[in-house]
Image: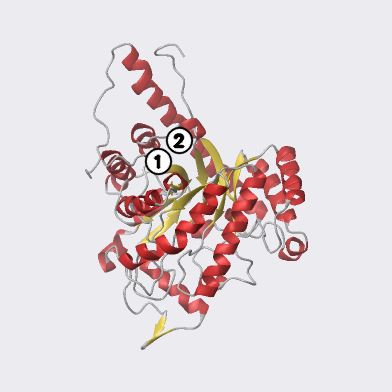
Amino acid sequence: MPAGEFRPRPMRLAILTAALQELTPRALRDADPDLAIEEWLAFAAEIGAPNIELSAALHPGESDVPAAAMLDPVANTLDLRRPFDAARAARVRRAMAAARVGLSDLGYFDNMLASDEGARRRKHALMLGVFDAAVLLGTDAVTGFVGRNPALSMDANLVMFEEVFIPLLREAKARGLTYRVEQCPMPGWNTSDAWHNNIAYAPGPWIALHRICERHGVGDQFRIHYDPSHAILMGQDSRSVFQYLKDRGYNFLIGGFHVKGQVIDARGISAWGYGGQTLERGDWHGREPSRDPAEQLNAWKKQTVFAEHELPGTARHDPLAYLQNRSVDWLDHQLAARELLAIEPDKTYLVVEHEYPPARIQDRRLLAPILQASLAFTRAIDAAAAAMYALQHEVLPAQGIAAQGIGREAYRS
């Protein structure tokens, strides 16, 4: 490329199939599991998503967490009750070619450090099945959580990570895969008062975990699938997070993005602070936690009393909220990623994740224009960031011209 040529590099757009969990009726998909993937690929083409992040999960009949206790029910679009073999993979590949929709990665979001050994064994077995499916479908990454054993301290969880999670990364390495960790702290995952139920929730823990991985020769398998909604939830902003990683020499850790926002409710912060509702949530009765899954859902008030998820584009443009880290400044997010992270933008996926509660409509006809608009917004904001970055960091410097102003600065709000 000639010096100073304008060549913006947009990221690759995708959508997580959990955006519409029951696109295919359960009776049909249970009898013919891969029909769910075929129909989601057709839906992705309809709404303008060039790629999907294929969601896997324990089947509703096998999950240890009832759907009624989940803030955002998961989707087993990829059904692994029987092995995903070459014949199933060939069928899905044909559907991908017919829809002209690609695959960013596979996602299975569960607690890999579950305290119950039997439950943990089932989750790890499913994760290995996801690894095998990823290989057959030709993707090089799987996204998920680390999780936490709530019966142990955070330091003790580091020991458990070394004992039970490192073997998973060895299996990923053997298959040529990267495991990308989403950093949600999962405050309402259980009825305890613990707020951090996924130990890989911020740069400090990522670095500690990566050092363990390096000692075992699987450092290249451990990466982060960054989601700015979780940074907002913890009072952080993306530019400062990315700057911290760069300052510490770990800006290579982020390998992909979930595009999902969070909108902070100032009234909720005034009432409870960033720890959320600490008592009288409704998930306990006196000295005992409720056994009713619908009441266990109240544990999520640790989060929901002061924050609500944003589907990109659904939150009003609010510069003051951006400066206070109370909503995601999407343009600066995409600029900061290019300016501070060790990524190749045109090889990096932006995966739209839909968890905005009022718009989680399980009706294809009604949901389609909502997702179509959000995808268009995400594509446009990234295109703007790509153009700004190319102009300010490549075109102008090649001619000795300085960019104007200062811009948002890390560690300042």
In the image, residue 84 lies at what x, y percent? 70, 55
Dot 1 falls on a residue whose secondary structure is helix
Q: Is residue 20 visible?
A: no
Q: Residues within 10 Å of mark 2 (few under 14, many from 20)?
A: many
Figure quadrant of residue 274: bottom left
Q: Please state which amino acid type lies under the numbered disc 2.
A: Ile
Pick whichever of labels 1 and 2 is earlier in the sequence. 1
In the displayed structure, does residue 206 sit left or right of residue 408?
Answer: right
Q: Which residue is mark 2?
A: 381
Q: Nearer the viewer, residue 144 or 124?
A: 124
Asked if the residue at tag 2 contacts the one at tag 1, i.e. Cβ–Cβ closer than 8 Å, the answer is yes
Q: Which residue is mark 1?
A: 330
Q: Nearer the viewer, residue 338 or 250?
A: 250
In the displayed structure, does residue 44 sit left or right of residue 245?
Answer: right
Q: Residue at x 47, y 14 (%)?
A: 1
In the image, residue 99 lies at what x, y percent? 71, 40
Q: Nearer the viewer, residue 230 or 167?
A: 167
Q: Where 359 falls versus 99 (above or below)?
A: below
In the image, residue 219 lies at what x, y percent? 41, 47
Q: Quadrant of the C terminus?
A: top left
Q: How is the image coloured?
A: secondary structure
Figure quadrant of residue 248: top left
Q: Please state which amino acid type lies under the numbered disc 1.
A: Trp
